[in-house]
Amino acid sequence: MISCDNLVKIYKTKETEVVALQGLDLTIQRGELTAVIGKSGSGKSTLLNVIAGLDRPSAGSVHVDGKNLLKFNDKQLMLYNRETIGFVWQNKARNLLPYLSAELNVQLPMMITGAKKRRDRARELLDMVGLKNRYKSKLKQLSGGEQQRVAIAIALANNPKLLLADEPTGSVDSKTTLKIMELFEKLNEELGVTVVIVTHDLKLSSAVNRVISISDGMIGSEMVKREDYRKKLSELDDMAHPANSHDEFAVIDNKGRIKIPEEILANMELKGGERIKIRKILDGFEVCKE
Ligand SMILES: Nc1ncnc2c1ncn2[C@@H]1O[C@H](COP(=O)(O)OP(=O)(O)OP(=O)(O)O)[C@@H](O)[C@H]1O
Ligand SMILES: [Mg+2]
């Protein structure tokens, strides 16, 4: 579904130049549910914006759903965004119009595309995100978590193949966070939509099978879940870090370069710049200090 190769994004202003993505490689399969974690400023929103066709990379390539985004002109890129992508913004105010009802908010993107039976479809989507009977509620009459559900319904209005959510649980408590996470999981399973969720909430990422960590605009490491998170719901605090629920893997990029997770480097007392040895052992390879 998504393939990024050596992606670079540089923001240039008069005085400064910020390298937000520096040679990022990423592959996400159709139907996957993936979380992207990373510190503030690590390039998470930049990555999502490039995948959504809202921003163009400075170098490298992006393919989504078999299409090369770099070949699109501005109009094609806008159509691609409208038809293929559902987006939940990091800034909540960008998702919703507070003076309109929930159902009118969901109908808006359908008005732009001229879709038919908008009211029925809006209500169906609101049912799907768990807001039955709140069709007529104004946004200000809904809680933060409920507003996020409306934002998710809006993102689904055009039947996207790819649902991108930037910090969808930024301002809700951990219980609501898990409920919203379960909603993404349900949508992923029932609609088959590929989902990428950006977060720095480690609890949220613990609910997902695949967690990609990005640091300094590059993929740092990848974590794959050990067991079903539902069993662990009761032990919420234990899940405060994905390391407690996921196995962490170093990732080899397309050029054969390995980025070793920081914790392993610290354990091996390596700072970078030292020589390491890769030895063949019985069922694999072992990395050790020279
Ligand atoms: N439009 C822009 N112009 C200039 N610099 C930008 C722009 N957008 C982002 N940046 C810079 O690029 C880097 C990555 O920003 P980005 O928003 O992708 O980070 P993030 O991981 O989403 O952070 P957060 O968790 O705080 O949302 C930051 O240093 C940021 O200041
Ligand atoms: Mg961001």
Image (cartoon, grey):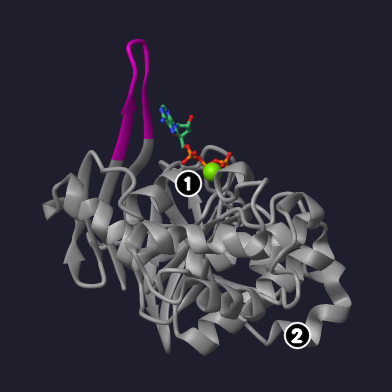
- Which residue is pictured at 57% across the width and 68% down the height? 153
Give the amino acid type for the residue marked by disc 2 in the picture. Arg
Beta carbon of the mark 1 residue lies under 8 A of ligand 2: yes
Label 2's element? Answer: helix
Determine the quadrant in which ligand 2 lies. Answer: top right
Q: Give coordinates of residue 271: x percent, y percent.
A: 52, 42
The local crowd at label 1, few if under 14, some if 14 to 19, many if 20 or more residues have their Cα within 10 Å, is: many
Instruction: Please indicate whether residue 225 sits to the left or right of residue 231 in the image.
Output: left
Q: Residue at x 57, y 57 (%)?
A: 105
User: Which quarter of the figure is the C terminus placed in?
Assistant: bottom left
- Is 6 placed left or right of 237 in the picture? left
Q: Amino acid at mark 1?
A: Ser
**Outermost residue, top side:** 15
In the figure, 203 relative to 30: above or below? above
Q: Are marks 1 and 2 in contact (CB under 8 Å)?
A: no
Find residue 230 and name its label.
2
Q: Which residues are magenta?
A: 9-19
Residue at the spot of label 1? 45
Q: Is residue 248 visible?
A: yes
Q: Main secondary structure of the magenta part?
A: strand
Q: Which mark is residue 57?
A: none
